[in-house]
Image: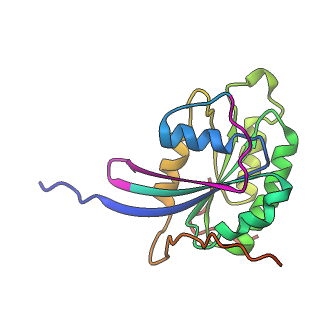
Amino acid sequence: MAAKEKTEKLIKLVLLGDSGVGKTSIVHRFAEGRFNEDNVSTIGVSYFEKTTDFGDINAKFQVWDTAGQETYRSLASLYYRGAHATIIVYDITRMDSLKGARFWIREMRKHEPNVCMALCGNKCDLEDARQISRAMGENFAKDNAMHFFEASAKTAVGVNDVFERLARKVNVGKRSAALPSLTVSKGKKKPCCGGS
């Protein structure tokens, strides 16, 4: 019997979330297999590429890690265009970060209403400091038609699962994963991939 042909996907993925929730740590863990205790806040946006073999799918991710600080929010929207998927990250030890996720969901859907979305509660290694229960995160994701995960960038638990689920669910179709222009001039709809 002939081997099943591997699906190739080029996926533009944007990470969103408030400052300090661990977006950059998640990207470094996924893209480089490492964790840095001394990560500083992202200024503007960082870009990473990672090709991963998920067995029947070979996914090349173009990952845009955006800054969560209010100062940079207007810049983040430059990177939404053409996104196939987004991971909205919150910190399970900070209730305000889940509230902040509402803003990021609205922002992304305003620019890319059919984007495949995942909600990821980071820092699940800090169970003793938890303010947001898993059930609360799951319900929030369900209410917003998103896939749900908890992960720890520090221990690597759950990180690859988020990217694999999106690689399997995202419908790349004929959409372009073109990179946005880096020149900056001054001056509830269900996503394509469904929820849970």
Q: Where is 174 relative to 32, above or below?
A: below
Judged left or right of residue 68, residue 147 is left
Observer-nearest of 144 and 53:
53
Give the tally of numbered discs. Answer: 0
User: Is 102 included in the stretch rendered in magenta?
Assistant: no
- Quadrant assignment, res 72: bottom right
Look at 63% across and 32% down and name the residue there: 152
Nearer the observer, 93 or 64: 64
**Residue 190 visible within the image:** no
Residue 89 seen by the camera: yes
The magenta span reads: 38-58
Q: Is residue 142 left or right of residue 114?
A: right
Residue lying at 74% horizontally and 73% vertically, measured from the top left = 110
Q: Residue at x 45, y 78 (%)?
A: 174
Q: Position of residue 40 (x, y in %)?
A: 72, 38
Where 161 sits versus 17, above or below? above
| Residue 137 placement, left or right of 191 | right
Answer with the quarter of the image where residue 29 lies.
top right
Front one among 67 and 97:
67
- Residue displayed at 70% across by 32% down: 123
Placement of 173 over or under 148, stated as above or below:
below
Percent position of residue 68, x then y: 77, 52
Q: Which quadrant of the rendered structure holds the N terminus?
A: bottom left
Indicate the quadrant where residue 158 lies. top right
